[in-house]
Amino acid sequence: GGPAIAGARVRVTLAAAVMGWQEQARGCAGVQVVEADGSRGVLLVAGGDQELAATLKFLVEAGLPVAGFHAERENLQDSYLRTVRQEGGQ
């Protein structure tokens, strides 16, 4: 699938469960929801620090009680190894 774009996995924790917060998060440009339940989830945010800041601002302005926002940057090596492991399977 196309060229890899820089980005980060972001662990989001909400102070209280909010129904449908994932749908709100998807409304932010460059954001994909990887997994989520009522009060926490993992987002993929394309881009760098500016985009991370914009994503956090977006979530807060959407009225979500964001208690944690932890970006996990991956270097290419980690990303490559994970991809190889997923595809290998043996």
Image (tube, rainbow, N blue to C red):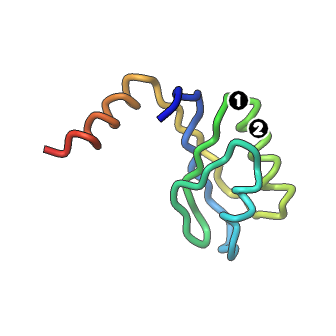
Q: Position of residue 15 (x, y in %)?
A: 68, 66
Report which quarter residue 61 is drawn in.
Answer: bottom right
Q: Which residue is mark 2?
A: 53
**Viewer-proximal residue among 30 and 57:** 30
Residue found at the very far left of the displayed protein: 90
Report which quarter residue 67 is drawn in.
Answer: bottom right
* Relative vertical location of residue 77 with respect to residue 18 in this rendering, above or below: above
**Amino acid type of the residue tagged 1 in the rendering:** Asp
Q: Position of residue 2 (x, y in %)?
A: 52, 31
Query: Which element carries disc 1, helix, strand or loop?
Result: helix
Is the residue marked by circle 1 packed among few (<14), some (14-19), or many (20+) residues within 10 Å? Answer: few
Query: Which element carries disc 2, helix, strand or loop?
Result: helix
Residue pictured at 61% horizontal, 50% vertical:
32
Q: In this rendering, would 52 be left or right of 74?
A: right
Residue pictured at 67% horizontal, 47% vertical:
31
In the rendered view of the protein, which quadrant contains the C terminus? Answer: top left
Total marks drawn? 2
Q: Position of residue 81 (x, y in %)?
A: 31, 30
**Viewer-proximal residue among 39 and 80:** 80
**Amino acid type of the residue tagged 2 in the rendering:** Ala
**Viewer-proximal residue among 66 and 37:** 37
Q: In this rendering, would 27 be left or right of 85?
A: right
Q: Position of residue 16 (x, y in %)?
A: 68, 72
Residue pictured at 57% horizontal, 36% vertical:
8
Whether label 2 touches label 1, CB < 8 Å: yes
**In 3D space, how far apart are the residues under numbered discs 2 and 1 (Cα atoms)?**
6 Å
Residue found at the very far front of the displayed protein: 1
Q: Which residue is mark 1?
A: 49
Is the residue marked by circle 2 packed among few (<14), some (14-19), or many (20+) residues within 10 Å? Answer: few
* Relative vertical location of residue 2 with respect to residue 25 in this rendering, above or below: above
Residue pictured at 76% horizontal, 50% vertical:
28
